[in-house]
Amino acid sequence: MSEAAKMPSLDDFEALLNETLPSEDDGFEGRVVKGTVVSIENDFAIVDIGLKAEGRVPLKEFAPAGKAAEIKIGDTVEVFVDRVENALGEAILSRDKARREEAWEMLEKAFEGDARVDGVIFGRVKGGFTVDLSGAVAFLPGSQVDIRPIRDVTPLMNIEQPFQILKMDRRRGNIVVSRRAVLEEDRAEQRAELMGQIQEGDAVEGVVKNITDYGAFVDLGGIDGLLHVTDISWRRVNHPSEVLSIGETVKVQVVRINPETQRISLGMKQLAADPWDGIEAKYPVGAKFTGTVTNITDYGAFVELESGVEGLVHVSEMSWVKKNVHPGKIVSTSQEVEVMVLEVDPSKRRISLGLKQCGENPWEAFAAKFPAGTEIEGEVKNITEFGLFIGLDGDVDGMVHLSDLDWERSGEEAIQEFKKGDMVKAVVLDVDTKKERISLGIKQLSGDPFSNVSSKKKGEQVTCVVKAVNENGIEVEVGDTGVTAFIRRSDLARDRADQRPERFAEGDKVDAMVTGMDKGSRKLNLSIKALEVAEEKAAVEQYGSADSGASLGDILGAALEKAKEDK
């Protein structure tokens, strides 16, 4: 037999190899077996799995997520046999599949026992992240990363940390895990432990975790408490970010614990002395202080007297003369102003302040400079149904009432002569500093013509000039005094037949008797009839009576003759 005939063919060699290797019936392929690293070549590890065959495994399959491979020749490793190729003895091996098989068995036990598993976040996918669980790849939804939304997950990647398996399906190769569930469980344990340790009034340290418009959440070591914006400082804080920053360590006091909701209210200002203690002694009524405008509203401005102590300057206390003006047109935020303390209410933590009181009262200044009776001049600022408003020194206004415009004419008639912008003279009648009123008079610039007749007595005879005649009587001027009076028809004569107004004409002089006077209304009552009756009575007394045989005509004739002689 030749040498060639003695050499086995490839088919014979494969048959011999199959006798040595376990058959597929033995389940060798698709199993995890142990092998030895015999060499490392070009990013591959050559692994001998004891089958007189070797397989190549990429080095990256031996590297944990995010780290470099640590493997050397001689190391024993477990690999997954995909299949044994052919008579050449090449095997298709996988370290990843081996690790995955091991991991799945371990993960299934953990899932059944509701136990945590360790893993590493190593990649991002749509809707979440990928996690390496000792070889098995799991999905971590974005909502399950943390208790609160996290903007940057980078610090959490490539580090080993615990996870909770939410769902797994080996047939489909799906695993869903949660980091949030682990944190919530730990947090609940820490919360229960911490809730049993802290009490209201305790001073503790915490870290600012989040800032909102209404306050800040402070982590007390597993449990969060709310530090409301009004409890940050005794002074006004418009937004917590003015005082606090995320990550800052702060010392706070436990103000209130709600055992039902397990909510904790915190305070920072409670650890500092209350600036309102003894406030009445520090800020007595009537004292003046310098403060800073912190806030301006429609009804006034808030002024900070010291940190934590603010007072309100009501709009009515801002200016002596600027009425119905928005406070923002008088002061501005951050402006330093001098104010006077008007009222202090410690129970309501309120201080009323005055800004105008720190300046000169223009009403008092005007009263001192222009006492009653002083003649002044000013511009007509406004005309109303009850008088004129005149601008005066010190940006104050004085009012001329309708009744003080003219001695004789009605106010409605006299006011028609004036218009806005006119410069007029007037007399100061009265200054009421409390009510901030100045009364002026224009008619008082000239003497009161009624004073010329105010000394007349009832029954006194006066000579008048007829100014007007109408069916009800006559209007007359008393002498040259400028005072007019009205003689009624019934007072024109003693005899009814002579009580006719048409008997008189404008310009006629007539004598009449003063029958009454009302100085308040400036009215003089006159009567010709009363004068005639009085003259008749006097004549009778002087020249006799009708009983003596003399007729009334004789008596009156004698009286008239005597009157002529006297003249």
Image (spheres, rainbow, N blue to C red):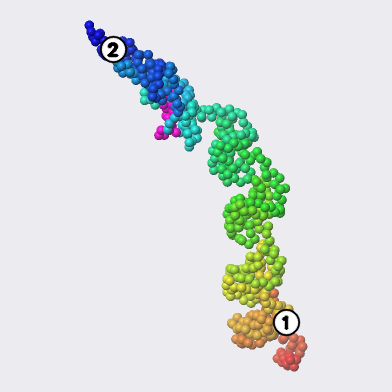
Determine whether 500 is above or below 92 in the image: below
- The three-letter code of the residue at mark 1 reads Glu
Q: Can residue 494 be seen in this snapshot? A: no
Please identify the quadrant where the N terminus is shown. top left
Q: Which residue is mark 2?
A: 13
Is residue 70 shown in magenta? no
* For residue 1, above or below residue 334: above
> Quick one: label 2, few (<14), some, or many (20+) residues within 10 Å?
some
Image point (41%, 34%), residue name: 127
Residue 372 rendering spot, x and y as whole percentages = 71, 69
Q: Is 104 left or right of 375, judged from the image as shown?
A: left
Secondary element under disc 1, as helix, strand or loop, is loop
Horizontal and vertical percent position of residue 421:
58, 71
On whether residue 136 falls in the magenta region, the answer is yes
Dot 1 or dot 2, earlier in sequence: 2
Circles 1 and 2: CB atoms closer than 8 Å: no
Q: Which quadrant of the figure has residue 248?
A: top right
Please give the name of the residue rendered at 68% of the width and 45% of the height, measured from the top-left corner: 276
Query: Which region shows up in magenta?
Result: 125-142
What's the amino acid at mark 2?
Phe
**Within-10-Å neighbours for mark 1: few <14, some 14–19, many 20+:** few
Residue 557 picture location, percent across and down: 71, 92
User: Residue 320 appears at what percent x and percent y?
Assistant: 65, 60
Direction front: furthest residue: 3
**Nearer the observer, 542 or 268:** 268
Outermost residue to the top: 1
Residue 460, which numbered label? 1
